[in-house]
Image (cartoon, grey):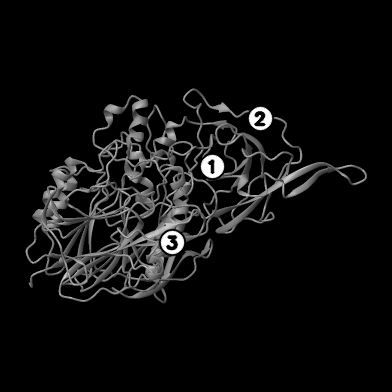
Amino acid sequence: MGVSGSGTALLAFLLLGLCAAVARSTTTTPQPAADEMMHESYAGKSEFRTVNRKELESCLNPSPYLAINVSTGGAPLPDEVFVKVTIDGVLKPNKSDWVAMITPSNSSVSGCPLSGVNYIETGDLANLPLLCHYPVKAQYLTSDPGYMGCKNAGCGKRDASGACQARTCAATITFHVVNFRTDVEFVLFSGGFKSPCVLKRSGPVPFANPASPLHGHLSSIDSKATSMRLTWVSGDGKPQQVQYGGGKSATSSVATFTQKDMCSIAVLPSPAKDFGWHDPGYIHSAVMTGLQPSQSYTYRYGSDSVGWSDSITFRTPPAGGSDELSFVIYGDMGKAPLDPSVEHYIQPGSISVAKAVTKEIQTGKVDSIFHIGDISYATGFLVEWDFFLHLITPLASQVSYMTAIGNHERDYADSGSVYVTPDSGGECGVPYESYFPMPSVSKDKPWYSIEQGSVHFIVMSTEHEWSEKSEQYNWMDEDLSSVDRSRTPWVIFIGHRPMYSSHGGLLPNVDSNFVASVEPLLLNYQVDLVFFGHVHNYERTCAVYQSKCNGMPKKDANGIDTYDNSNYTAPVHAIVGAGGFSLDNFPNNGETWSLSRVSEFGYARVHATRTNMLVQVICNLKYDGGSRPVSDCEDFTKEASEHDSFTIAGACDINKTKLESLPPFIDYIFAILFEMAPN
């Protein structure tokens, strides 16, 4: 979701006189208090562009001894590195001094772009540096605790006797850099983010191999599980290969997109069209065929000319109609820096969740992952996709990574979105569909169904027209009517924006028109479980239809909520939007249909057989404000009891030594057990 779907986003359009274009209800997230934010996000803004592009003023009396030293020592950058940047020769340290990492290095930093509304439109409300070109990262020199006290003193000038005539100060700060293909430059500013002036530039620092094949991630192409798609990024547009399975290979198809493909409006150019643009390089995609379901294979990708990735082991999912499936599901992840930098749109829980899911995969008990909307939160700042892809590579390179589109991938004015908000920053789904090719109907129709194990998944787009008689509605109706329950006993419906949520805001999270159009399909075709994101928490309902509980769970001997599904009453809905974005709180009193509410970072783990389905919610994953994720959920492999039932359960396996420090009222361990009548 993000705050951009809120009244803030609406404000951006009101300022442009476009409020009449907002045709549908949108969403909101309150801005977290300063002490709740792990970082502030910064993304190069100016107060002047609505008038003109204003030249930055020169810094008054800059030190003649200034120097910027980059720890590579003149060597090019590897694919990933923590770069130490040392600023020397400062005569008088000032807390307003800061360093920006700019790419490409020839980008202009001498003028200022748009007014603050242009960042607000994406939902990022933080104070932002006012530059013409988006700084990928920014840090104040006060990140070095010795800077203001000049604890790292030097001498800029000595007299003939060797005595120091100009005492100088220094600071060293660290930037985490990944290979986004274009060279970088580190620029020293003073004046803070609001009125910066340039003091010194480092000169360009290139990557050693801009064409390096990176960020390989897998996806399923059908329900047979005998083929898998691998997608990766490279700076080279010539076809490459994936080599796999002890001698097999497949050649990549190559695609890219340009600034012309981005959405915008004449009055206010979008970030993707303007100062947030970054060349995506080339997206390679190849299909590995001749595989067997539920088997492990080794692969590498690249070419002799650009280099090869490391060898990676992946596992195919079970074929549709087979007996068992285990998958992980979450929404609204994004990314966060691995250094003290500030960036555009930081999602503070993303690192912890990604690391926890990676740990899940290492158990060998995860067949696939579903990320259901609000994928990277790049929102028009295209280089952020590279950082997100880098974050998920350890998990998405090992199992099928299936996605659904969200508002922050698709929505923008005049783009055909159901919701006319600026939430995608002008991306309009183009980068999303390029990086994550799903087995969808066709381009810009990102809905699909797929079967894995005993589950039939139907994945819709809440951002494309879903009203009755629309193309997507007719497709959903046809797909649900075709499900063979003897093959796949369970039907799971997936989308981004929810039908039920207790979290309120300036504008509703739930679109009543959406519910009125689509909810009857869920009941008519006896959908078992519905997953949504968009709201940044976890919430589970009763068996609900039209806001009324048609079925309520009962506690079993282990305290697990058990729904008797021998007589179907209605679907159970679960919001799993706590994958990384700043959390949404709940009201004191929930709706009658709301049975469990947890505002903690986490994800759901699902295990389905032909007779039961268990959903465990792994929660209370924390981010300590630095580079290290911490978790109070230490055992990710607790087995559920076996019984002839199907279970939708959420459980956080909390280390007993930490249990006492957790709020006792939070429902960390719960389950939903559906008992089905024998066929």
Looking at the image, residue 55 sits to the left or right of residue 336; the answer is right
**In whole angstroms, how far apart are the C-alphas of marks 2 and 3?**
42 Å
- Label 3: how many residues lie within 10 Å, few (<14), some (14-19) or many (20+)? some
Mark 2 touching mark 3, by CB under 8 A?
no
Mark 1 touching mark 3, by CB under 8 A?
no
Residue at the disc numbered 1: 135
Local SS, label 1: loop
Local SS, label 3: helix
Q: Which residue sits at x=42%, y=63%? A: 631
Residue 233: x percent and y percent? 45, 56
Determine which quarter of the picture holds residue 345.
Answer: top left
- Label 2: how many residues lie within 10 Å, few (<14), some (14-19) or many (20+)? few
Q: In which quarter of the image is the C terminus?
A: bottom left
Residue 328: x percent and y percent? 31, 63
Q: Which residue sits at x=72%, y=38%? A: 92
Residue 513: x percent and y percent? 17, 40
The amino acid marked with disc number 3 is Thr
Specify the farthest residue to the right.
161
Q: Quadrant of the N terminus?
A: top left
The amino acid marked with disc number 1 is Pro
Q: Give above or below for 382 relative to 578.
A: above
Residue at the disc numbered 3: 393
Looking at the image, residue 468 sits to the left or right of residue 265; the answer is left
408 or 174: nearer the viewer: 174
First of labels 1, 2 by sequence position: 2
- Label 1: how many residues lie within 10 Å, few (<14), some (14-19) or many (20+)? many
Determine which quarter of the picture holds residue 597.
Answer: bottom left
Q: Which of marks 2 and 3 is in front?
A: 2
Residue at the disc numbered 2: 58
**In whole angstroms, how far apart are the C-alphas of marks 1 and 3?**
24 Å
Q: Which residue sits at x=43%, y=33%? A: 118
The amino acid marked with disc number 2 is Ser
